[in-house]
Amino acid sequence: MMLCSGTIFNKPFFNKITLGKAETEHTTDKSGCRIINIPYDSYIQKTSIPQDALICKVSETNSGDENAKAIQAQIDFATDNASGGMVVIPKGRYKVTTIELKSNVTLFIQKGGELVSVDCDENERSQEKLNSGIVIAKDARNIAITGGGIINGSGESYTFEPECDYPLYALKSFNLYTRVIESRKRLRKGKPVRRSSAIHFKNCCDVKVFNVILKDSAWWTFHLENCKDAEIYDFIIDNHMHVANADGIDISGGENIGVYHSFIATADDAIVLKAVDNPIKNVQVKDCVVSSFANCFKIGTETKCDVIDVSVSDCKFFLPDGITGGYAGVAIETADGSKISNVFVSDIEMNGISSAFLIWAGNRMKFGNKPMGKIENVKIENISAENVELPSAINSCMDEKGKNCINDVTIENVKIRYRDTKESLSILRKVPEISLKDYPEITRVAHIYFRSHEMSRYWDLPCYGLYIRNADGVKINNFECSPRSVNKREKIISV
């Protein structure tokens, strides 16, 4: 195994051992940190302002506290009206702290208008520090954000500079440890201060967020916590691709939630379901273009409550040249006791994603002792994945009765093609059970953690296509996988 031992490559040497991936439709800037050709006009439209709307008295020279108070006054005024109303942010760039949206109110950020979070230093000096989000709502109903404008999280200011500040291209000779360590060197880790979401709605119902851009979040970009009947569409997240913990859309509990026709580019998991305090039921993701430095769609990792009835369809997942890393296009994980059932993934195109999918039932049990979680009735079909670097996996522990925790999985009409390079592998023939107590990601299926990632061991799986362990009722029909031309591993292994 070729090890880096945490050594920082200098630019000339590192460039000699890397090469570019195949081009994707959407590309990065020279820093390898941002996607520069997001098709805004395909998602965001100019919308007229109703005559009876309330125009906020904000100023580009005001402090964040002053603008937030002016906006809040109009929201409170609209709330006092039994029928609610629309509060308008006009064209311009306005610093703000936290704004609370209330029942029957629509926040209309005019196209050309931008709410900009106070930066880290400003927030630390402020008398009214940011709450859990720039725009928050709690126990509200019939709320919306729209208008074509931007909510900007000033995310980079809440993070440290990365260890490496130049693009990471694909390795000429793939090595898992090198890929993991070099990817992590690009992360901008958070400063020891509170970081806020762009939007955080808690215990809300009848929610619509559409025709709006969320940009440069410092934390989970859009957090829907135990919300019901929510629609997100004609929507963009345009984040720095290396800000740690900057998830895209986090659904932590709730039901009847749809994400449609959206473009999401972010550093951490792009669309992620976390069932900690409340179960999740009936989530639909459709017609989305997604780029993530982690997982494009994920259930987990925090999985205490059950997740049922989830569908993901007609989407494109990608990671562009210069941003090498990431985990899976689709990750379905129970680590803390959740039962995950009725998950359907279909008609997904992937390019540059490390691995097409991971299904993982582990026994991390972060929230205390309880019966092991289970994953049941999953179907993944009509998947095309180009330029992958790792096999997919279905990986399960056994429950207290000695039975497998993954049951009834169908993999059908899947076509995967590796990026063709040399490879420097360290193959582990028998994967240790201890890995299932660890954090579930595709790079860690055969991983043992020692104090830091640099000190840890990363092994390659003994197959290139699909690794199956401790799973019952797995049905595979028309699974194609083209490995690297130097490949010597088997296509599928089931143990």
Image (cartoon, rainbow, N blue to C red):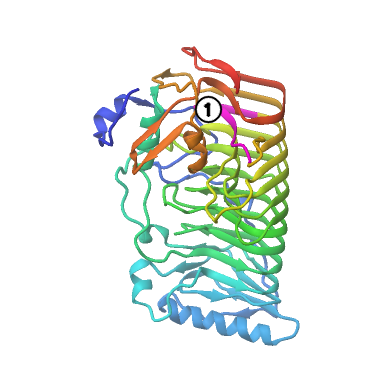
Whether the magenta-drawn stretch holds residue 390 is answered as yes
463 shown above or below 346: above
**Which residue in the rendered view is the most extreme toward the front?**
401
Residue 342 image position (x, y, % from top left)? 75, 43
Magenta-highlighted stretch: main secondary structure? strand
Res 45 quadrant in image: bottom right
| Residue 227 horizontal/vertical position (percent) | 68, 64
Residue that mark 1 sits on = 388
Segment tinted magenta in the rendering: 384-399
The foreground one among 340 and 117 is 340
Picture residue at 49% right of the left edge, 69% below the top? 92
Q: Position of residue 421 (x, y in %)?
A: 44, 19
Q: Quadrant of the N terminus?
A: top left
Quadrant containing the C terminus in the rendered view? top right
Q: Secondary structure at mark 1?
A: strand
- Relative to 153, does residue 441 appear above or below in the rendering? above
Q: Determine the residue positioned at 61% across, 84% down.
A: 76
The image shows residue 377 at horizontal and vertical percentages of 74, 38
- Mark 1, Cα crowd under 10 Å, few <14 / some 14-19 / many 20+, is many
Q: Quadrant of residue 427?
A: top left
In the image, residue 178 lies in the stretch drawn in magenta: no
Q: Is residue 322 visible?
A: no
